[in-house]
Image: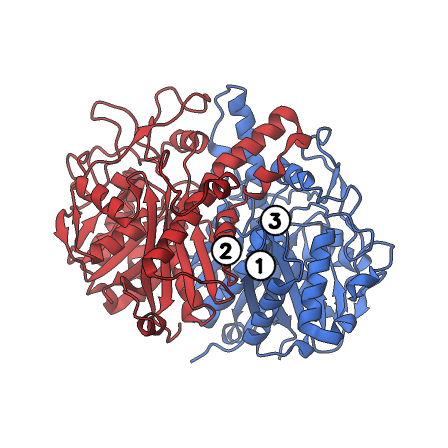
Chain colours: A blue, B red
Amino acid sequence: MTPGPIVVTGLGCVSALGDSVAANWAAALAGRRGQRDLTLFQTATHRTTQAAEAGLPPAAAGDRGLGRAERFAVHAARAAVAGLAPERLRSARAGVFFGSSTGALLEGELLLAELLARRQPSVRPIAGIQNDGPGTAVARALGVRGPVVTWSTACTSANVALGAALDALRSGEVDVAVAGGADELCQITYAGFNSLRAVDPQPTRPFRASRAGLSMGEGAGVLLLETAAHASARGATVLAELAGAGKSCDAHHVSAPAPDGAGAAAAIRLALREAGASADAVTFVNAHGTGTPHNDDAESKAMAAVFGARAAHVPVTSTKSVTGHLLGAAGGIEAVLTTLSIVHRLLPPTAGDEPADPALGLDVVLGEARPLPARNLGLSTNLAFGGNNAVVLLRSPA
Amino acid sequence: MSARSVVVTGVGWLGAFGTGLPALARGLAGGVPAVRAIDRSQGYHRPNGATLVASCAGLDLSPWLSPQAARRMSDLSQFAVAAARMALQDAGLTDVKGERTAVALATALGPGGFTEQLARQILEKGGKAASPFLFTDCVANAAAGQVAIDLGARGANLTLCQREAGPLLALAHGTDEIARDRADVCLAGAVDEMKPLVHALLDRFRALARPGALGEAARPFDQYADGALAGEGACVLVLEAAERAQARGARVLARVGPTVRAFDPSAGRAGFGRDAHGLAAQLQAQLGHALVGVDTVVCGASGVPAHDRLEAAILRRALPHAPFAVAPKALHGEFGGGTLGTALLALANAEFAHPAACRQPDPRHGLALGHGRHRAGRVLLSALAAGGVAAWTVLEQP
């Protein structure tokens, strides 16, 4: 017996746009950017000064000692599960599927600085330094007893986690899954992306001819997923269906996407196959859209390969233009915003004043939010280091 | 989950005992770990802390990796690529290019050496000094990405970070890629490197065995246990659909059985929980009759008393018939996936020595380690991770 559709019934997120879903959605619709001068660490020795730095969400009981990314994760997860009775989570039938690229690397840097200064630091603050820190913090906070797994596939981490949650729900291993990702800003990723000349000194300009790199960001995005039967039995409001997920690898380069976008296209086709949908059914795309020349070019080619001539007419946005790039959490917050697009039938604009790069051949949503049809199939894509590609498809509930 | 049965047709292992599964077999039969002194010259360590590591330093990987290719990679990536090539060779596969080949690797610690070097560049010389070369290979999924590039593997490329449970989870997710017909071949396993900084941090967490009157050694389930032996290496299995392996006349090493995944929310961020009863109940409920035929257990026991206490209590409850139990981490060290190789050896009638350092079984554990030549029919792999994640997997005679 198949469990039927897998549905989204709760959302939570934290980013530079705020620590609530409402604040993030309002800012995304308005094209209000979260980028500003960094305060988390000194930028004097770095090549750029801006990032989409998030405020630390208020701590709840039990959060003492958690690292920054763990705080983001737990806050977003609590928001996502707010409508669910806690005992449904404190069960072997509930799991946590999480993505994180850096874990608590900022705390790790601080610890290393202490060690290099020949001090004897406490190791307590870095107990969550490993990449599974945010996911296991969520599992502990919610008391789940089922599968808890963390993927660290760089910028696709959260989308990979969403796909794994979908598998676990479809197979009947769990009834409820808390899935998404969390990451924090740190000097290694900030300086690292700068060393690749992949950071735009200005707020990122995805899909523009002048695009010059990404904006770093941080935060978390979490979805509550459950079988439709489970949601129905408890009278939950269904926001969207998680219809499919696809993963692939370019096997091309450690940090650059394959220029022809073939790997990303393969991941999209796999997700469509799993969703039982054709490419023609996709009504909008929340793209990876980092604003690096290579990414946006490869991604547009992937869309051209999948959608054909229709690629020029499928509305595309990059919400990274306002949230910044949340790395391992990107797929999480973008799935949250994609779900909200389905709920509100509005696609937020890609922030910025310039026109879209005509060479990409995409219908980039600019200026203001674009109304969407009554029923939608939204595609959310992420590409990553290691040639990693992972996408998810969300659609209007039946 | 799916009708596609999955088998193991090749294995690549490297660790302190050398390269290739026969090297691991000799090490396990010898009963004495291959250890050397960790470099403490950076001043990261506590004065009276752990001094030994099961290191891969000096291993000749040139049969699988050219010196030119090795220079472009972290140790972690080198280990992964070498083990993957070794595994394919063992499986008699020469060309696995394409979208039907997946990679699923676990790493608990990631590329700690490159991360440390990069962090030091930034902390000591400023952000502009960051090396792009170090950055691109310091993400956790770099090793899996390098394997994909090396082999042209364009299927799903997964990196799991779940501490000590990672190897079993990677095996489970790799198996799932084939079972769900998303891949025909999957290279699944674990890889880790052990650098002085990570060694020192583990020691500061009191996770490692310390020098003392009895000598510094990992003593799983022993009255004198005081910590683990830190190790490094890689173990990669070639997974294939059973019918595909049969069709090409492949030698089958094992059939992959079910995996149980669970979480113990009583665990702290860096410690182990206490809910043996709950975890054993989940193991029994989900594996059911498959447990009855288990004649061998490859324990995750590492000599960390809290870990070993919990694992013994779970196994006592779930397997009252007391199957032959081995704790190979006493010999090959913690991390690097050696338990996967050990399980295959158990299925191949290998010789197991009682770890020489284990003096007196702790009677509270009620679990005695087996020794002598042993041919397993059905092996249960057991893994409990710091932070609360648990996993168990069955490997059995084909």
In the rendered image, the quadrant that contains the N terminus of chain B is bottom left
Q: Is residue B83 left or right of residue B373?
A: right
**CA distance separating discs 3 and 1:** 11 Å
Give the answer, above or below, for where B290 lies relative to B130: below
Q: Amino acid at mark 1?
A: Asp
Asked if the residue at tag 2 contacts the one at tag 1, i.e. Cβ–Cβ closer than 8 Å, the answer is yes
Q: Residue at x 66, y 39 (%)?
A: A190
Classify mark 2: residues with Cα within 10 Å, few (<14), some (14-19) or many (20+). many
In the rendered image, the quadrant that contains the C terminus of chain B is bottom left
The chain containing the residue under callout 3 comes to A
Residue B249 sits in quarter: bottom left
Classify mark 1: residues with Cα within 10 Å, few (<14), some (14-19) or many (20+). many
Asked if residue A371 shows in the view, the reply is yes
**Numbered badge on residue A255:** 3
Q: Amino acid at mark 2?
A: Ala
The chain containing the residue under callout 2 comes to B
> Residue at label 1?
A250
Q: Is residue A222 left or right of residue B323?
A: right
